[in-house]
Amino acid sequence: MATALHDISFTTMGGSHTTLAAYRGKVLLLVNVASRCGLTPQYSALETLYRLKKSQGFEVLAFPANDFKEQEPGTNQEIFEFCTTNYGVSFPIFSKISVVGPNRHPLYAELTALRPVRTGEGPFMSLLEGYGISPSRPDDILWNFEKFLISRDGAVVERFAPDVTADDSRLIVALDRELERL
């Protein structure tokens, strides 16, 4: 795993610290999530994908963030209960972090630096601009449910716009390619 990304600490829902090193050898999909967003139903497709591919060495890692129109205002416990009760989420959900701005978590600072360009930002970007919303920097996280695909060796191999869902062929093709690499 790339050293900087590998060493960045974040907090589990249980309050302990971990890093991506705990997932060494797995293909990861890191997603910033929110429970009061129009994209929140993506939890269903993420859970389906996770269950289908977990046995092949795949993990979805969810990072709740309240950065976009305060769409994740709850406590960590409330977020966890919402996800498990409403969407049957069984993949790891971590403590709430910030993914943009001056309080951006170092993990997301590194992810965006390593992969500044996202796939699939067409219609969603236009929709946000219609509401007068645009990222401060071109490499900033655009909105909730942006996704980063991490290879087994820790390289950031792809970044997907929020409207690229877990069942989108672009994501599936990239994921399957990474899962085939041992």
Image (cartoon, helix red, strand yellow):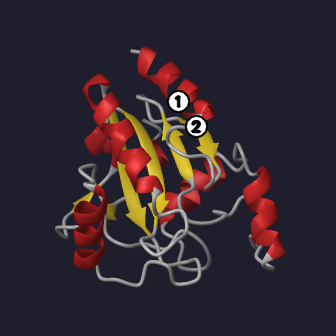
**Side of 89 relative to 153 (left or right):** left
**Side of 30 relative to 141 (left or right):** left
Image x and y of residue 6, in percent: 40, 45
- Classify mark 1: helix, strand or loop: helix
Quarter of image, res 41: bottom left
Position of 55 relative to 95 (above/below): above
Residue found at x 23% / y 67%: 13
Position of 11 relative to 31 (above/below): below
Which numbered marker is on residue 172?
Answer: 1
Question: Could you say which is closer to the camera, residue 128 or residue 4?
Answer: 128
Q: Quadrant of the C terminus?
A: top left
Residue found at x 56% / y 28%: 174
Image x and y of residue 105, in percent: 48, 68
Does any portion of residue 68 appear in the rendered image?
A: yes
Question: Could you say which is closer to the camera, residue 86 or residue 119?
Answer: 86
The disc labelled 2 sits on which kind of residue?
A: Asp
Residue found at x 74% / y 51%: 121
Name the residue beneath numbered marker 2. Answer: 168
Q: Are marks 2 and 1 in contact (CB under 8 Å)?
A: yes
